[in-house]
Amino acid sequence: MRRYSVFAVAREGLRYHTGWERAWRSPQPKKKYDVIIVGAGGHGLATAYYLGKNYGITNVAIIEKGWLGGGNTGRNTTIIRSNYLQDPSAAIYDKALKLYENLSQDLNYNVMFSPRGLIMLAQTHHEVRGYQRTVMANQLQGVATEWVTPEQLKKLVPIINIHGPRYPVMGGLYQKRGGTARHDAVAWGYARACSDMGMDVIQQCEVKGVRTEGGKVVGVSTTKGDIDCDKLGMVVAGHTSVLAEMAGFRLPIESVALQALVSEPIKPCMDVVVMANTVHGYMSQSDKGEMVIGGGTDSFNNYTQRGSFHHIEETVRALVETFPMVSRLKMLRQWGGIVDMTGDRSPILSKTPVEGIFVNCGWGTGGFKAIPGSGWAMAELMAKGHSPLTQEFDMFRFREGKFIDESVAAGVAH
Amino acid sequence: MSTRLANSGRLIDRSKPVEFKFNGKRFKGYEGDTLASALFANDQMMVGRSFKYHRPRGVVASGAEEPNALFNMGEGGRFEPNQRATTQEVFDGLTIRSQNHWPSLEFDIGAVNQLFARWLPAGFYYKMFIHPRPFWKHVYEPFIRQSAGLGQVPQEKDADTYEHFYYFCDVLVVGGGIAGLAAALKEGQAGKKVLLLEQTADFGGRAVVDGVEIDGKSAEAWVQETLAALNAMPNVTVRNRNMASGVYDHGYVLGYERLTDHLSDKSGPRHRLWRIRAGHIITATGAIERPLSFAGNDIPGVLLAAAVRDYVVNWGVSVGDRTVVVTNNDDAYRTAIVLKNAGLAVPAIIDARASGAGPIAAEAEKLGIRVLKGKAIAKVKGKTRVTGVKVCLQAGEGSVIEEIACDCVAMSGGWSPVVHLWSHCGGKLNWDEDLAMFRPDPSRAPTGADGKAFVSTVGSASGYLSTADVLKDAGLEVATNEVAAAPLEPVWLMPQGAGPKLRMKAWLDYQNDVKVSDVQLAAREGYESVEHTKRYTTLGMATDQGKLSNINGLAILSKSLDASIPNVGTTTFRPPYTPISLGAITGAARDELFQPIHKTPMFDWHDANGADWEPVGHWRRTYAYVRNGESVHDAVNREILNVRENVGTLDASTLGKIIVKGPDAGKFLDMLYTNMMSNLGVGKCRYGLMCNENGFLSDDGVVVRLAEDTWLCHTTTGGADRIHGWMEDWLQCEWWDWKVYTANVTEQFAQIAVAGPKARLLLEKLGGNMDLSKEGFPFMTYVEGKLGEFDARIFRISFSGELSYEVSVPASQGAALWAALQEAGKDLGVMPYGTEAMHILRAEKGFIMIGDETDGTIIPQDLNLQWAISKKKEDYLGKRAQERSFMASPDRWKLVGLETLDGSVIPDGSYVPAPGYNPNGQRNVQGRVTSTYYSPTLKRGIAMGLVKHGPDRMGEVIEFNREDGTMVKAKIVDPVFYDKDGEKQNV
Amino acid sequence: MLLLQCPYCGVNAEETELAAGGEAHLKRATVGDSDEAFEGYLFMRENKKGVHLERWRHAYGCGKWFLAARDTATLEVFGTYPAQTTEPPADVTENIRAKYPDWSWKETA
């Protein structure tokens, strides 16, 4: 693989960029692979990448129904943070964050990781206590976060209104290392690196069936024919239940639509990511200048990736309340993505009832930030059969009642 | 140069001149002008700078598809970035400033990027700026951000108001061109309730500009007659300046009506968002002309051919004196003819088709216009405006045959139906090879709740381009004077063999600076999906969302991949059609109306008496009543001590109150609560716990048996609706044969806690007919009767540990009772107390608080509340869950009291580290604090917390972390800090 | 923005008037049932891409819970019916079969 660098761009500029290689090959599937990963989104590609990089397993195919990175990887609001309350969450998200910090160099592809900082607003006393608890937990987890006062917050985010008549800002949970990255580039960078290791990224190839023998996986049937494998990773956020049904088991998840929007681009005005959970809205400014805004999920099962309006309305109301100036901006585009939600809203990285099949799903609305950590942990689980990072995210935890619940701010008060 | 013509201009009113400011200069226009037409009238050809290379940009279109002419508009609270000049009407006093340049439009430092354009192809940033690592955050990214971004940031709060409007109709027709008018007429005549929306100020679309005759009368006359007929129908509503911005599931459509954007007078709402439910939607949204891809097609003065025609006919402005028309179809000949007839020069029509046009060519030639067949533009000359074109063979590689001096180029690459609304909910498209366009496929329409199609298209939106065909599609057979057109010939690159130098100058996306060479590079590098190419090159991602560029880009991509256009596919169309203001989306729900505030009957008294407000759910509760010279903390301490020493009153009206009644009510409550409620005696109170099916505590409160078949269940503040819904869920969906009735009466009653050693004295001072004595009214019972003049239910329950009564009266009597208590209690030292004092009072007593001691993962056993779990019951909601292995584990953290050794307060949220680290390198933990306060009663820090094996470790000292990294030592103690034997509440 | 007809009050209710309640016709597992059965009741969901029988409450209307048969891939609504039943009524099943002739519900398969 020819390396990307300023010198390579300079050289190519002189010959009208005719010498660039394909970023990834577009091969036909082979008869058999050691490992098949279904789903060429960020999580699937990262799983394949770390299988190769960390365990030398490169006879790998990543098969994708549509185009690589075309699912939730390309539909999210690109927020990256690891300020989670519960230990297992903090562990995997912080692993991801650490990998993000060096990902551009590791992949030789600029994923534009931008650690501009992230603040979660506390707008009730209850939320104040919840986030202070998170700061304390993070300290023992080795995740640097801090509590900031409304005054400090106003300095970090000058466009914020801390005196909102309905929900004044009472402070915030600040993670300086948090930020954003260019979502497409993450998928493309991993795909290029996987392809370079000799793995096959096979797009436009839909899985129609999962073939098992004696309770063990032997391969998949696809629109490009049968492909055999020893191990199978299901990494198809939003459609996991459909794939699991092909393999004959059920999962504790439901698919719902998540809504997001961007405004027209304006000059830089907010150099930090802000999440306002009481009023349900979060916002950051992209490098292009668009305000990238995310909101709530539908509460009903949905497989259509269409935008719905009332969530957008609620989110925009919340943001106009928090950032009054956005009222004069215009919505450029809204869209929906299908996410799968588990019983405790935490992900599943797990073995399954079928030997050789592993599942990575249930990231809900927060999957993008986890991509490198999720891939790293999933690769370990698939290569070694166990991983400390995935241990608590087993799919059977619900049977024991062992939840990983991040919703401390969702309680009630007298 | 561009100028105002002496005649013509069907939309402007020359008797009404207006003045506006552009970059500080005074310009003149007329009412009816758009900003774009008025700028042309003032010879302002350059209007902005492109996003990436800061290239000079001029107006290219005349409608919503305009990618270039975007302005910072207005001042102060009415400032708005990225306002599109082609859809903004001018008014007197309007101010605009051009965008994305520094220091000025004419001399822009950013234009230096053009020198490096060769090294800044699509996606260059993915390949550069990788090393050294910190440089991305600190050097490269800030630079890229600063040079991107278009419009300025609004600095002030929005000075305008917005509103929402609901509308229901049988048929919604979108588009007020002839197709839409005809469709609306047909539906209206059929008796349907019809709404017709037109995004611009006027009706008729292209037909009136092109001067077509319909059944012997002018299109203008036909449009006016049809409009009059529609307006006369009571079942038809017609609205202009109202754009259908998005089609959503089950026939939901948003209409974006701009009420004052075109007026000097800004009173009244600025935008009105129509929330429409339509039985059926007909999109008559017309078609958009495509640019041609030739070198220099982005220089100011290169416009769409139909736009050049619009400016002459609609607004009486000429873009240039000498216009070269370049086309691959017959329609652009109309522009040449209109210009010639207006007395302007048209040196040539450059037709890429070797066979040229149909009969319209003869018409042009008769006017003396030179028609060059099989020719193309090799290159446009000029920097900040067009000075000429170099002509070459379309079939060749760009060798220049001749140069033609001109100051305007009118281009037409064919037309694309506007299929956005059709596609928003999944309508599919077919590629029409002959017309080189995507057309809606009626057999794959978006389907609604009934599974049937709910959107259809009509006219140009269906892909019909002649007036007769358009009206026929709308169900109207008419005769027109249009001549037959020769077929269009797809031209995706001009000349077809253009080399890399020309391709690098052939723009696809004007705003985002995406060129033919960029799309080809993306294809070469394997970004084969149209979505990849779009994202890699940013094609179609600008504020026009690719209305001009998407099809051209797609065609270049498909050629590069040797694939057919339909096989490469289109990107997804997403709402809105054109950007709509966030203000309109917000509507009236801002500031005080952002979310409704729930107020108790005593709200005004609290507000007048120093209430420091706290939002709790939708309620506002008083955190503390702050007196002059006091801090909030002082006030809380004062209130607590006064409850302990005298008497205090708490507004507890927000507590949920649900009546549960019926023969099976007791059985039902036994399932709902962990305790037994069916055996509660009439007139008695019992504290109850509710769990969800996962076994986790979800709510608590006192249950009162009002009568043999009637219970009153108190819930937490904010829990009332949730718990009532929960009850109804079980009653309607699981135990629907049980005879139980529930009513949420939370807001029907005001409730006041009267707590403190002098509580009984205070109530007795009000008088009435109830026996309030210790013997006559024992703890955990209730009485009903007259308290003074008030109709009261009094519950003898205590959440503070003091002698305490909760008095419940009809909501209408709440304020008066509150006032009466303050008045009567003056000499007893009565003071109101707020929620924080309540929290601390209960913590001193070791009472748990839902939301503090619980967080959605806590079972009653964790809080040592086994006493509140009935052993006699076979089942209750949550029981099975609590039997699961992790729930039954002896290692679960349990509730204890905590006393700091130095008397300080443990920080909120603090954890207790345990020795060692887990496999993920995180410090092991063995507990955490759940409630922590300074107790003014005990004059020290007290806390409750959950600690592993906690109840077995009484007296042990453990350490809690602080944010600064130091630790605070605390002793594990009984959680009841105050009056352990409960003597005070029982006096 | 879905429209569902409340079978009790007859109102064509907007999605914003309704609260979704997940998969319908679940059998409550409780004391005496196995861990697996209890897990199935609380967590394991069909999550069908296609016909989904589900619970809704007309929360900002008559307050009643009702059930709906809806296609999660197209959002077509085959019918709504009262919650007080253990299986979809015949007319709703018929509507579903008109679109999916081979459709059968897990409990009647």
Image (cartoon, coloured by chain):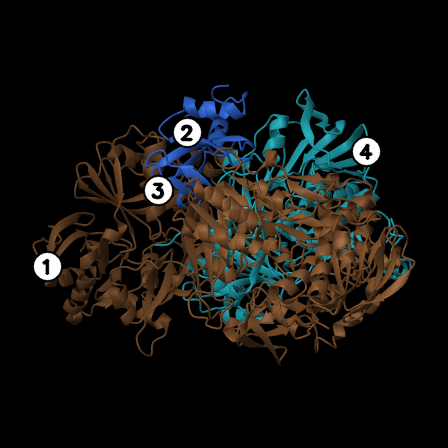
- Secondary structure beneath disc 4? loop
Residue under numbered circle 3? B725
Residue under numbered circle 2? C28
Residue placed most toward the observer, A281 or A85: A281
Tell if the residue under mark 1 belongs to the same chain as the one under mark 3: yes
Residue placed most toward the observer, C21 or A95: C21
Amino acid type, mark 3: Gly
Q: From mark 2 to mark 3, how far is it between C-alphas?
A: 18 Å
Q: Residue B313 placed where, x, y %?
A: 63, 63
Residue under numbered circle 4? A28
Q: Label 1 lies in what chain?
A: B
Tell if the residue under mark 2 belongs to the same chain as the one under mark 1: no
Residue under numbered circle 1? B789
- The brown-tinted chain is B
Q: From mark 3 to mark 4, how far is it between C-alphas?
A: 55 Å
Image disc number at residue A361: none
Tell if the residue under mark 4 belongs to the same chain as the one under mark 1: no
Amino acid type, mark 4: Gln
Give the colour of chain A: cyan
Q: Residue B855 placed where, x, y %?
A: 44, 49
Question: Which residue is drawn at the image coordinates 35% and 49% (left, top)?
Answer: B719
In the figure, is residue B863 to the left or right of B574?
left
In this rendering, the count of numbered labels is: 4
Amino acid type, mark 1: Glu
Q: From mark 4 to mark 1, how far is it between C-alphas?
A: 88 Å
Q: From mark 2 to mark 4, how far is it between C-alphas?
A: 48 Å
Q: To which quarter of the image does residue B542 belong?
A: bottom right
